[in-house]
């Protein structure tokens, strides 16, 4: 699978979870997809300050991407990297 296909799958997966994030006052921005399939995102709005953002990232965002891209290594949020 080439880089363009990977990006398309990641973007499509993010569009599936975006309405749920926006319903709670948040959103998500795709920052990068590395060659080894680590997806970097930024959680914005209410999601940036939410104490459940790690759960949202793993159970929501990562699971959605993994359904479209089974070889995904992980999803990391730049605002959760501390």
Image (cartoon, rainbow, N blue to C red):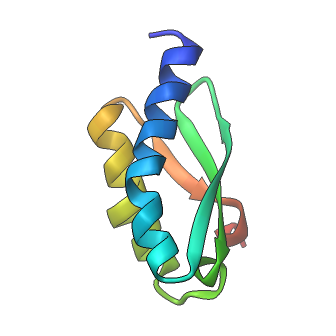
Give the residue at x 60% y 60%: 28
Q: Residue 18's x, y, as percent?
A: 47, 60
Relative placement, left or right, of 18 versus 46 is left
| Quarter occupied by the C terminus | bottom right
Residue furthest to the top = 2
| Quarter occupied by the N terminus | top left
Relative placement, left or right, of 62 versus 51 is left
Relative placement, left or right, of 9 versus 76 is left
Relative to 77, does residue 25 appear above or below in the rendering? below
Give the residue at x 52% y 31%: 37
- What is the total number of numbered labels drawn onto the structure image? 0
Q: Nearer the viewer, residue 81 or 42?
A: 42
Give the residue at x 64% y 31%: 34
Q: Residue 39's x, y, as percent?
A: 57, 43
Q: Residue 29's x, y, as percent?
A: 66, 54
Residue 68: quadrant of the picture? top left
Relative placement, left or right, of 58 versus 47 is left
Q: Residue 31's x, y, as percent?
A: 71, 46
Give the residue at x 64% y 87%: 49
């Amino acid at each position: 699978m080439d880089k363009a296909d990977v990006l398309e799958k990641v973007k499509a997966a993010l569009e599936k979870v975006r309405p749920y994030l926006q319903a709670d006052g948040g959103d998500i921005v795709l920052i990068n997809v590395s060659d080894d399939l680590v997806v970097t995102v930024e959680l914005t709005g209410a999601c940036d300050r939410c104490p459940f953002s790690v759960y949202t990232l793993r159970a929501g965002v990562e699971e959605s991407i993994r359904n479209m891209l089974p070889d995904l290594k992980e999803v990391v949020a730049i605002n959760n990297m501390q």
